[in-house]
Image: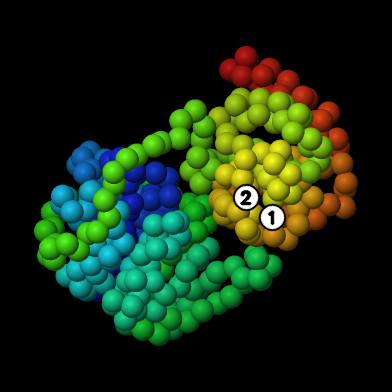
Amino acid sequence: MAVIVFAENWNGKFKKLSFELVSYGSKVAGMLNTSNVVLSIGDVENEELNKLGDYGADKIIKIQHEKLKNLDNKAYTSVIAQVAEKEGASVLLLSHNNTGKALAPRLSVKLKAGLGSALIQLPASVEPFTVCKKVFSGKAFAYITIKSDIKILTLMQNSFESVLSQNNATIESFSPELDEGISKTEVTDVQKQTGKIILTDAEIIVSGGRGMRSTDNWGPLEELAELLGAATACSRPVSDEEWRPHSEHVGQTGKIIAPNLYIACGISGAIQHLAGVSSSKYIVAINEDNEAPIFEAADYGIVGDVHKVLPELIKIIKEFKSEN
């Protein structure tokens, strides 16, 4: 019996969400009195793999195969299932990102496993196995009991702290059985976005709403984002008015994000918007309406005209940076 963590890598490097997942897996393994086994698929150097041990991996299984260079849901499902069966997995963990959301349902069917998705904390109990997630656009919590022998869980980003544990994890290679033609995904061209931070990867996001008043007023918001090394985003009315590109729209009908810091500038905080940003670790709201719903979700609030507040924030940050 073991906990299996699928640690996704990006061009041979792991990101914060992978370390969060490994730390979460370590705690779940402790609750079950079993080992925390981390699976890595792709070309990752041992030096990078060893970092997984620093966050709680007891054993690391690495798989490098020509047919697995590109993410193919069918092929990856087969490989992860083989590892789960080899290790006698009782729990299988994935991040609740695009990859995890694509793989988890397939694995659930293949392994006849119960699925708990978008979890926000450790299991409330392991006997019976009960997990917690947000429901009704983050307005309530649901506790779900999974009764199957194997449990598949996806963890929301920023819902669990990555904890250094300095484990001396062993690294083991594994050669999966892959049928001819199992991978049907062929990448013919790669065009990477340059010059901007990808929203779903950003640690800090500065976002604007209708309170920005027009497409001509985004200079200070962009300057603040640049100073903070942040990505820029917007609410749905802003993208509908074409003040900003639709790729920046965050909310229930846009991108779901979970940065460490979300700064909402001139955003009232409709429930559809909050549903997409409520997993942010800290929310700072700037709005001249002190009864705006955004303040109910915010950790810190500034009541004032965003067009006066932003220049002051920029000035303070510049002064702070010049002194340090």
Q: Is mark 1 in CB contact (under 8 Å) with mark 2?
A: yes
Disc 2 on helix, strand or loop?
A: loop
Q: What separation in Å lies between label 1 and label 2 (alpha carbons)?
A: 7 Å
In the picture of the structure, the residue carrying the numbered disc 1 is 273
Q: How is the image coloured?
A: rainbow
| Percent x, y of residue 201 | 48, 43
Amino acid type, callout 2: Val
- Looking at numbered disc 1 in the image, what kind of residue is underneath it? His
Q: Is residue 200 visible?
A: yes
Q: Is residue 224 left or right of residue 25?
A: right
Q: Position of residue 2 (x, y in %)?
A: 26, 69
Mark 2 burial class by Cα count in 10 Å: few <14, some 14-19, many 20+: many
Q: Quadrant of residue 127?
A: bottom left
Q: Residue at x 86, y 37 (%)?
A: 304
Read off the residue under disc 2.
Answer: 250
Q: Is residue 122 above or below residue 23?
A: below
Residue appearing at x 52%, y 52% in the figure: 158
- Which image quarter is the N terminus in? bottom left
Q: Position of residue 259 (x, y in %)?
A: 56, 46
Whether residue 324 sits left or right of residue 118 in the image: it is right
Question: Where residue 166 is drawn, which disc sits there?
Answer: none
Q: Position of residue 173 (x, y in %)?
A: 13, 54
Instruction: Name the quarter where the C terminus is drawn.
Output: top right
Q: Is residue 295 above or below residue 135?
A: above
- Give the secondary structure at mark 1: helix
Q: Is residue 260 visible?
A: no
Quick one: 276 or 235, which is closer to the camera? Answer: 235
Judge from the rendering whether residue 309 lies leftward or rightward of residue 167; answer left or right: right
Mark 1 vs 2, N-terminal side: 2
**Quarter occupied by residue 208:** top right
